[in-house]
Image (tube, rainbow, N blue to C red):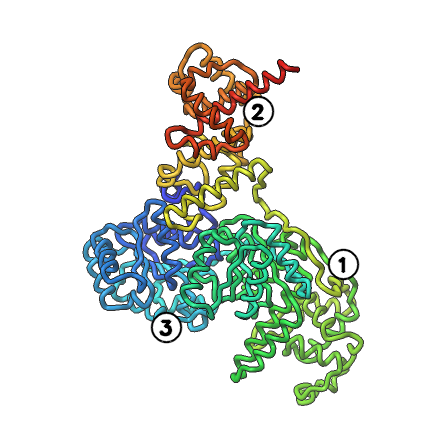
Amino acid sequence: MDELTAALKAHFGYEAFLPGQREVIAPVLAGRDAFALMPTGGGKSLIYQLAALMRPGLTVVVSPLIALMQDQVDRLQANGIAATFVNSALSGDERTRRERAALEGRVKLLYLAPERLLTGSIIGLLERIQASAGLALLAVDEAHCISEWGHDFRPEYRQIGELRERFAQVPLLALTATATTRVRGDIVTQLHLRDPFIHVASFDRPNLRYDVRPKDKHTYGALRSYIRAHPDQSIIVYCHSRKTVDDVAASLADDGIRALPYHAGMEADQRAANQRRFIQDDVPVLVATIAFGMGIAKPDVRAVIHYDLPRNLEGYYQESGRAGRDGQPADCILYFSFGDKAKIEYLINEKTDEQEQQVARRQLAQVIGYTQGQGCRRRALLAYFGEEYPQPDCGNCDNCLHPAAREDRTTEAQKLLSCIGRTGERFGLRHLVAILRGVQTQKIRDLRHDQLTVYGVGKDLSEDEWLHIGRALIEQGIIHTAEGELPILMLTPAAWQIIRGQARAVLPARPAQLPARGEPATAPGAATLDDASAGLFQYLRDLRKRLADEQGVPPYVIFADAALRAMALQRPQTREQFAAVPGVGQRKLESFYTTFTDAIRAYCTQHDLPLELAPDSAPRRPERDRTATHLLTWDLFEQGKSLDEIAAARGLRPTTLRTHLIQAIREGRHVDRDRLLPPQRYAAIAAVIRRLGFETMAPVKEALGDGYDFDEIFFVKTFMLHDIQMELQTDA
């Protein structure tokens, strides 16, 4: 294992880097500036966090939101990494204490908002740190805020580049999840990056399933049914208006679903409390406007549902991308209706700036094209960001899972393609459709397009039908879109083949309405849990929640769902096995090894499940090997050896040996219980079990108190059940 991978495992508990992480970390460690564009959930923050640990000095992280700072600092501290933030939420004394810790070298990462970074006091502090311990790195997160072309423009971000001259020798790293080519160039320029290493990752999120569904009078019922079918899973429901948020949240609550609202019209304290309860897993569903989301790094959101039509694809990609940040399967469901389209068009018409209207109409047209398209949803989203999906279909969106019927539309395609050619390849789809349908508009008259031979040749089809044909031709690459103030359509060689009758245009049929979809498919490569492992997974989630509440942190700070799934599948019992779980670094190994392995052993013993299963990626041990190992323990115990002696001889934990002996008891083999448990303790435990029953041992443990442990309780339960079985056999 090389140094970088060893550091990754020791500090963060991962065996391998995500795509792009190592490629960016390496030049940063060498002192080079870098720019990284990676999708949500792609692991951007780990890049500067690991680089900070491997470079001498303090790393300063510029972050736009207090919630984002708090979340990342909580996670770092849970991994034993010295990190802190300084922002306006702190008292003056607390800010001074934290700044002093940074100056004295007791902090490796310091998070600052851009407004605070540019104050004279902080600049002076950084100059003193540079002169003493040194500055390792300046990392600018959410770097699209720097650009005047970005959708979250903040003036203070544009001034960060001024620090480049003051700290010329400190490498600067800019990171963002979404930026067009124009915004990327602006970021590099505004930050004064010097010969930066540039990494642009794929925007693809293969674990997300994209699904468009019809919105009608049955939509609320469908939403309610979906949530009920996924109990206790974290779900975000996005709505356009505050009123819709309040109405949907109230309806869900009336129907017995734990859901809370979130929007800018609420009192700040209540809004913050609702956000906190969602992040803490106190409630599974948050109904929100798009005011919720930026800076929220909750990794285990299993679905993002757009109850209303989004206004642009970039916003939709960001909002839907808040699902499945942990890489586990998640659903992105969008409900579409032409009524929502009309509402957005009304708001666009209310804009006074004509250029703003054009941009908004273009963005809305892209959203409509996405919802009405019959091709791969993933391909369409990636194409918006200038990325070509390499496969014919993704197998994880509604259109790929339920492809529409196809039909020959060569005649209609020839009419549309001819219209593109006769108008000089200079116009958008709607204008071309108006020509084909013989519509009289001022623009058509001014350009004399009503004199073309193709004018009115498509009167037999509705506007929506022509738009469907045009979008299908675009999806198949027969028509090329060139970007301008409005997208214009241009012909490709394939288009000319259709015009000349050398090729056919076979396109997806346009359904009367979008069909309802079934349950989501499992994302490619996702491990599935059988019923037994699913029960253990939920048991570990409950344990995680209790620990998180005790520590005052979100549950995912303890462990992500992916780590708990691995524990449920592998059921580790040794330190080596537990350390191999993804997300278990050195600090979490020391903090949680005993707690979680004890819980796994207790659950498995209570539910008669085998322990220490091999990881999914490795071959499982044959059943006879597991049988042989517990019989070897039993044989040594019968020879008079103590558990400590057997543990030393076999290199196993005493708790594992007790599990072996329980298995032997269940098989009817003799085990001297007095050697395992003093008679008086056995009697005390047995009395409580008789009073409370055999169903679950947690109440028994609570009744007995801290003087007894689960190992003893399960031993007694096993002996008692064995005795009852023998009595029944004798009576028979």
The residue nearer to you, when weighing 709 against 443, is: 709
In the rendered view, would you say 179 is above or below 621? below
| Left or right placement of residue 1 versus residue 386 in this view | left
Residue at the image point whose x is 54% and y is 15% from the top: 669
Question: In this rendering, would 376 be left or right of 327?
Answer: right
Q: State the CA–CA distance, disc 3 to disc 2.
A: 63 Å
> Given the image, on which type of amino acid does mark 2 rest?
Pro
Q: Is residue 47 visible?
A: yes
Q: Earlier in the sequence, mark 3 or mark 2?
A: 3
Q: Nearer the viewer, residue 249 or 560?
A: 249
How far across and down, in percent of the image, does residue 408 sit? 79, 63
Q: Is residue 2 left or right of residue 605?
A: left
Residue at point 43%, 43% (across, down): 583
Q: The C terminus lies in which quarter of the figure?
A: top right
Q: Position of residue 274 (x, y in %)?
A: 46, 60
Residue on which the image places disc 3: 155
Callout 1 secondary element:
loop
Looking at numbered disc 3 in the image, what kind of residue is underneath it?
Pro
Eyeballing the image, is 590 above or below 361?
Answer: above
Question: Is 465 placed above or below 44 here?
Answer: below
Residue highlighted by disc 1: 405
What residue is pinned by disc 2? Answer: 622
Q: Secondary structure at mark 3?
A: helix
Asked if disc 3 and disc 2 are in contact, CB closer than 8 Å, the reply is no
Sequence-wise, the earlier of marks 1 and 2 is: 1
